[in-house]
Image (spheres, helix red, strand yellow):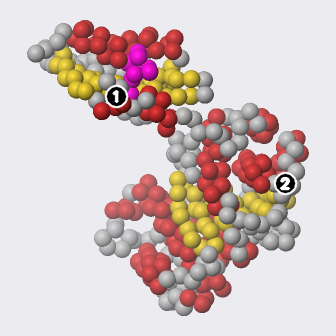
Amino acid sequence: MPTPLPEALAEVRAALTDVDRLVRAVGAGRRRGARPRWRRVELRPVDLKAGRRLQVVEHTETGATTRNLEPADVAGAVDVLLTEPFGNWHVETLEQTLQIRVTKKGEAQVHRAATSRRTVAPSALHAHDRIKPRLIEPDDPLFTVLGADADKRRQVDAFLRLLEPVVRRLDAAPLRVVDLGCGNAYLTMAAHRYLSNRRGGVRTVGVELREDLVARSAERAAAVGLDGLSFVPGTIAQADPGLGGVDVVLALHACDTATDEALARAVRWRAPVVLAAPCCHRDLHRQLGAAPHPYGALTRQPILRERFADVLTDALRALLLRMVGYRVDVVEFIDSRHTPRNAMIRAVRTGAPPGPDVVREYTDLVEQWDVVPALARMLTPELAGLRLPPSAAALPR
């Protein structure tokens, strides 16, 4: 039997404002002849350092906005949401699931069902929402010197979470780290700070072509007491870090084939750990001709051609690293909202020879697409023993 809409919405309001009993809620759809400001809204409690908050995520056609409401702001914000002409509300609490659908006549069809969540402690339901501790505290003087905003701090934290598990296994003392093409050195300094705090005995060298950036980075490092961190001017291909060996090679957003130069240096140094976040990918984009059948649709449109070249470049880089003795994964660096260049190539040296399937996969790709990756040209001596067919060998073009 239909329920008057104000009565049904009052029940929704009571559930949404009881943050300790609410599990999640979604408002979506639209009523006849009306359109809400948002395509969909989602509400749930989250446990922050400052206490429990009601998180509201408002989705539009082009994106989403997230707010964590103070207790005093919850009732007013919920009242605003309930004035929006959503056609459906789905609300889960510890005791029940409440579903409301607004009919064409403007009445509410209400369905209630007991929930199996009643035996679960509220704090346990939201334990996964607790903020992960930052690997470098947000109030670290390093971020002040770098002028790092919240997005930059998130990027730093995401990078360190990718670095930590592969470096943890290294027992080198001191740990020797080289960042090739370090630019403004945000991540160079963050890596050095984190690794020094965790294990001590770290020596890090940032290599950068621009001498003004080298001087500025050195000043910043000195200002926050980053002992053991230094910067040298030079190219990636000719860089001499002067460490007597390298344990970790970083190459973060080096442009085009500069990433390949960094990977080639890492291979020649036999570096145990390599992390590279590629930037622009022009080399294969220039080489791509007519796509082999039946893949014409992948390169016909300019934007798809550019994105495909990016994917093909990094796929071939990963295969080449496997062919010279590395275990490789390609992972998301950070959400694309923060940077569109969000892939990370993470490689750990095993020294194991490649299986025939890896070599065959690489050969098939370069033959089908008629390309020669820059990294293959740079690693010609290391690949010579694999006896690649002439069509897949890194011959000059």
Q: Is residue 322 above or below residue 139?
A: below
Q: Is residue 364 above or below residue 242?
A: below
Q: Residue at x 61, y 88 (%)?
A: 384
Whole-number angstrom distance, CA of label 1 to CA of label 2:
54 Å
Q: Position of residue 1 (x, y in %)?
A: 10, 15
* In the foreground, 65 or 272: 272
Q: Residue at x 75, y 70 (%)?
A: 237
Give the structural element (helix, strand or loop) at label 1: helix
Residue 384 visible in the shown view? yes
Residue 47: mark = none
Q: Which image quarter holds the C terminus?
A: bottom right
Residue bearing the label numbered 1 = 118
**Is 223 situated left or right of 181 in this image?**
right
Q: Which residues are magenta?
A: 16-24
Q: Position of residue 391 (x, y in %)?
A: 48, 86
Residue mark closest to the camera, 1 vs 2: 1
Q: Position of residue 161 (x, y in %)?
A: 62, 50
* In the foreground, 200 or 348: 200
* In the foreground, 115 or 69: 115
